[in-house]
Amino acid sequence: MITVRGLAGALHRRPRLRLALLLAAPLLWLAVLYLGSLTVLFVSAFWTTDSFTSEVVRVWSTDNFHALLTTPVYREVALRSVGVALTVTALCAVIAFPVAFYTARVAAPRWRPLLVVAILTPLWASYLVKVYAWRLILSEGGLADWLLRPVGLDGPGYGLTATVLTLTYLWLPYMILPVHTALEQLPAGLLDASADLGARAGRTFRSVVLPMVLPAVAAGSVFTFSLSLGDYITVQIVGGKTQLIGNLVYSNIELNLPMAAALGTVPVTVIVLYLLGMRRTGALSSL
């Protein structure tokens, strides 16, 4: 008969078995909830809808994917969604680097933890509160108009630009944190050696700093790209008449569930391809 002490000793001698048993329950839960839901999503994309009753007809068909590939509006919205996600990612990278460089290399060591907390503080606020705050900022007569009208300009209002600005603000901390960590771990001796060899600031950045920080930028881009691509609430609030892939999924859920499922496979596929591309940069190991 196996005793508790004997079982504990067996597990102690087999660390891999102990780890497998420890992770079995959460991995099974992940498989059921996440992978299971993706499987249901993909399967339901092959069903159709009765045009008269709007009931789902569980008959296998590729009509939804054919419409997805041949209908111009679907292609346009999909490309626009990917473009918005890439633009937000690029803006986050451009803004994050100087901020992270200051917090990691320039600020006094005693202030760095406080600056990191300040960067994380927006994440503690409600998503909707932040988006509606930007709606007020970008509204006619709002803060953006008040700041730009003295120089003869108007605020961007609601639309694609407003969507990009809001998403950039929302996901910027996810880019700053990995870049800050990479810059903090950058050996100061490398920068000193580059300066001793006669390299100027620009050459040091291109040849020393950028290659070592690029995996962290790629790691941050995984968050900014995927979160922007799948977002549909921000464009509903500040996007005006702009449509992204998330809006089409949301609008088709009640009217045409199989078509909504087919549309939902687009961001999933794009994100998987993006992750495969980022794997080559070492970004996934930096997460």
Image (tube, helix red, strand yellow):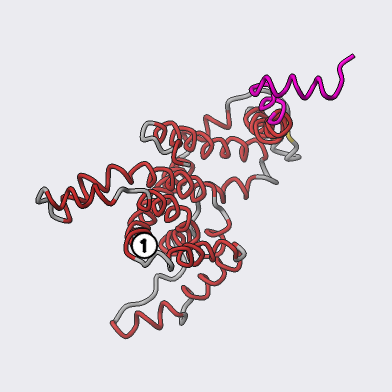
Against 126, is 22 above or below? above
Q: Can residue 155 be seen in this snapshot?
A: yes
| Lateral position of residue 198 relative to residue 253, left or right | left
Residue 177 appears in which quarter of the rendering?
bottom left
Determine if the magenta segment contains residue 14. Answer: yes
Residue lying furthest left in this view? 198
Against 10, is 51 above or below? below
Q: Residue at x 37, y 81 (%)?
A: 147
Q: Residue at x 54, y 72 (%)?
A: 133
Determine if the magenta segment contains residue 147. Answer: no
Q: Nearer the viewer, residue 198 or 9?
A: 9
Q: Position of residue 145 (x, y in %)?
A: 40, 79
**Residue range (magenta):** 1-23
Q: Which residue is mark 1?
A: 99
Residue lying furthest top in this view? 1
Q: Position of residue 134 (x, y in %)?
A: 51, 70
Q: Residue at x 32, y 64 (%)?
A: 106
Against 162, is 287 above or below? above
Q: Position of residue 146 (x, y in %)?
A: 40, 83
Q: Position of residue 194 (x, y in %)?
A: 17, 48
Residue 44 appears in which quarter of the rendering?
top right
Q: Can residue 239 be seen in this snapshot?
A: no
Amino acid type for the residue under numbered disc 1: Val
